Amino acid sequence: MSTEAADAAVVASVKEYYGKVLSSTKDLKTSACTTAGKPPAFIIDVLEKVPSEVTDKYYGCGTPLPGGIEGLSVLDLGSGSGRDCYIAAALVGEAGKVVGIDMTDEQLTVAREHAETFTTSTLGYAANNLSFATGYIEAIASAGVPDASVDLVISNCVINLSPDKDAVLQGTYNALREGGELYFSDVYSDRRIPEAVRQHKVLWGECLSGALYIEDFKRICHKVGFSDPRQLSISEIEVHDPELKAITGNIKFYSILYRCFKIKSLETLCEDYGQVAYYNGTIQGSPDKYALDDHHIFETNKPMLVCGNTASMVEDSWLKPHFKVVGDRSHHFGLFPCGPAPTAAAAVEASSCAPGGACC
């Protein structure tokens, strides 16, 4: 079978699984496509207002929705029934905009049915700021999203379902404005998936067959332009079904929340320029501290010595209104002692309740 035919077969299988096989989260055979961990209070408040038909068909693995996104333009890749889009529509406010892209007609029908009523009646907006486009996440521009038009791209346990992850990440990078961010939960593995496992239809639908080896994900990021992907949280995925467990063997799967900034000044290593950053305490849900990633926790108004990349992430991105950076890159002091994200196994053991919930 050619690569094109194999990719088409994967897409068809995923469409069938999410459009016809699954009727609700109760039909899942693993914990990969369910959110373990409690979302922050500001998200729970909105979630309670989202129609039950939308939440019943939710198959995400995390809560890839940062606070502080008022007025931003948000794109959700593989939006499904639209749960995260509905929440994002509330978080961005009337001045913001949310678009979801999905290829499954059954899911899109549910997502579209309640969008206008939710935004104009439930949220009280003068106009609907939430829409859904039929399309493939490997071809974002073809779905009507121009290059450099989006501030924030989110995705919840979907990119693993794509047979062409390079295209997804490159299209995402292109769609983002400078200073924009890909903030997403997905499924990863501690090794490359054997072909026999990759061919299993149920494991594809359950988000495991298509899981990227963590280090391969980082390699793709560097290739498309995301120079410094940061891990925010991690949790191990359980395979409940005995038959599926026998097939996956010793492979370990993890739900990880990554954030990847589109900032030209980012380097592949953390360099020291003697910069200091302050968090203002102004991001929704984070009045006392803010987790940029799993090893950068800013306390409000407390100076933190940071590497050049971290300084750029909080000064040259959509986060800028919430931070103050002192210093520039005029003097270089060598490598910054910025501890990288721990290995997946160590991270899970160290913190099963890391910030951000399930996917991390």
Image (cartoon, grey):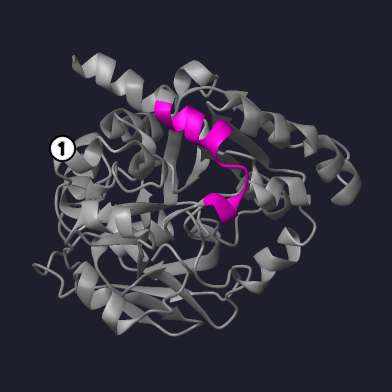
Q: Is residue 323 magenta?
A: no
- Identify which amino acid the numbered label 1 is placed on: Glu
Residue at the image position 73 percent from the left and 32 percent from the top: 112
In the image, 116: left or right of 349? Answer: right
- x, y (%) of residue 290? 48, 74
Tell me which corner region of the image, top left, top right, bottom left or bottom right, holds residue 97.
top right
Extreme front residue here?
243
The residue positioned farthest toward the left in the image shown? 334
Q: Is residue 229 visible?
A: no
Instruction: Point out the image quarter for the C terminus.
Output: bottom left
Residue 138 appears in which quarter of the rendering? Answer: top left
The quarter in which the N terminus is drawn is: top left
- Residue at (32% x, 60% y) in the render: 242
Q: Which SS class for mark 1? A: helix
Relative height, residue 102 to residue 327 (above, below): above
> At which x and y percent is residue 291?
43, 72
Residue 141 x %, y %: 46, 20
Q: Considering only vertical position in the picture, is 94 above or below 141?
A: below
Number of residues whose C-alpha sits closer than 10 Å to that of mark 1, classed few (under 14), some (14–19) or many (20 or more): few
Q: Give the range drawn in magenta.
A: 13-27
- 343 relative to 319, above or below: below
Between 217 and 183, the residue placed more toward the observer is 217
Left/right placement of residue 12 relative to residue 347 reads right
